[in-house]
Image: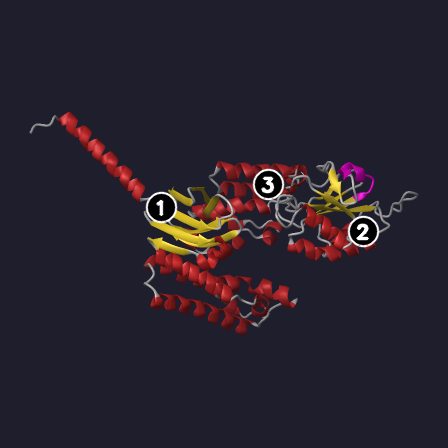
Amino acid sequence: MFVHKKIMRQVIKIILLVFLVLSCENNKIHISIQIENSINDSINIYANGIEKIIIKNNDIFKSTLDIPSGYYNLKHGNQTTKIYLVKGMDLKIKINNEEFDKSISFIGDYYNENNYLKQKSLFDERNKENFKEMFSKNEKDFIKNISDLIEIRSTFIDSFENENKKLNRNFKKMELNDLNYRYFYYLFNYETAYKYYTKKEPLLSEAFLNDYENFDYLDDYSFKNSTYYKSIVLSYFLNSEKFMLGEFKDLEDLSKSKSILIKEEVANQGKYYLTSKIDNIDELYNLILDLSSKTETKNELTKIYENINKILPGNSSPEFINYENFLGGNNSMSDYYGKYIYIDVWATWCGPCIREIPYFEEIQKIYENKNIHFISISIDDKKRPVYNYSKWLNYVKENNLSGIHLFADNAWNSDFIKAYNINSIPRYLLIDIDGKIISADAPRPSDNDLLEKINSLKHINCDEKNCIV
């Protein structure tokens, strides 16, 4: 039978196209999730800057995902679990939302690895570390403690394989690497944690310091697959103490490397380290900006940098307008001009904020008759189920808190909060009698530097009749 060459070429093209489409489809992740007692119509799957939302259809959360293989978080409502996804896999998941971690089950490709992650999570829940006890030990006992901890979890992997199928070789390698990085994570945090828990300096041997002298901070693969390695690397490249001293060599080294994933995440997290406290803010901003290739990240960094230049000492402060006052009515920042203003930005859900309150109460007693207002601005969210407007009212009332208590108009998204680049709390601001900025990141009430700062204010001893300068 004769077939025209032109037709044959068209047939070949069609066959190749179908093959490419099927190959592409086989390279995607097919996932189906059934949730009993679900509380909303969406599921989030996210990790390393990737986030996919799956919407419920006919009681099933089903989707085809075109994302890299690796570990991901699966979140429904306030419940989260870790899952392992691989290109080309077909996985079915069942969950009872009322017993989220215990009830989750898997059918399909890599069900064994995902079941291991479930069992590992439950094991960790039953065997939580006592951090205070662990980090309060001397070096020798601490090393033994964390070595035993890693050994127990390594044995857990063996036990799982004895009772189930063998784990995928690459997956098992990642899990063992993560245990190794967990050991280093504890090691790196020992000195700081020991000081925190014991209020003393640890005695460290040279051998202890040598353990992480040659640590590799530029491994994208480990950064993607180990939360402990990721935490170590981010802490290394984003070091506030070094930034305050104008030391940026680590970031310069990172910019010359080929670690694309690490660069992007350091740039993304770098926004939290751009503050008006840093003298060489221009240099730090440019270094962090150059790490990213994403327009969205660059735009966000630039906006924060531009805001910082607006809130430098001596500039007019951004103002809050018509914030609800706990005692009734509404107040704007201009209502308090004529005295210095020390502002505490906080929320009832914020543990560090709550821990500062006793110190804040003491500071107010010290300066009770001085020329300064103490204002607390809550950024509790009215839409939150627990830590909300009512929680704020009750907390201030039940604890009989001193000072002026205001409620921000839109939580984190309030114009005043955004103007000061406030992305973590507690945060303290110090404003002069004319509404000019003294400090956009003032010392905390528990910091002795605050007393020194307030005492140095020229008009702090003014009252209605006289002013002692």
Note whether 222 is above or below 131 in the view shown: above
Report the amino acid beneath label 1.
Ile
Residue drawn at 45 percent across, 50 percent down: 35
Mark 2 or 3: in front is 2
Residue drawn at 60 percent across, 44 percent down: 274
Marks 3,1: beta carbons within 8 A: no
**SS for tag 2?**
helix
Q: Which residues are magenta?
A: 330-340
State left or right for residue 458 relative to residue 246: right
Residue at the right extreme?
465
Q: Is residue 239 visible?
A: yes
Q: Quadrant of residue 118?
A: bottom left
**SS for tag 1?**
strand
Find residue 116 and report its horizontal and vertical position in percent. Answer: 40, 60
Find residue 79 and report its horizontal and vertical position in percent. Answer: 51, 52
Marks 2,3: beta carbons within 8 A: no
Tell me how far mark 3 sits from mark 1, CA to CA: 43 Å
Residue drawn at 69 percent across, 44 percent down: 440
Kindly identify which residue carries mark 2. Answer: 455
**SS for tag 3?**
helix
Q: Quadrant of residue 131?
A: bottom right
Find residue 177 and report its horizontal and vertical position in percent. Answer: 41, 61
Q: Is residue 181 visible?
A: no
Q: Which quadrant: the N terminus?
A: top left
Residue 151 vs residue 241, the one in the foreground: 151
Q: How is the image coloured?
A: secondary structure
Residue 282, labelled with which disc?
Answer: 3
Report the amino acid beneath label 3.
Asp
Marks 1,2: beta carbons within 8 A: no
Residue 421 vs residue 327, the one in the foreground: 327
Kindly identify which residue carries mark 1. Answer: 29
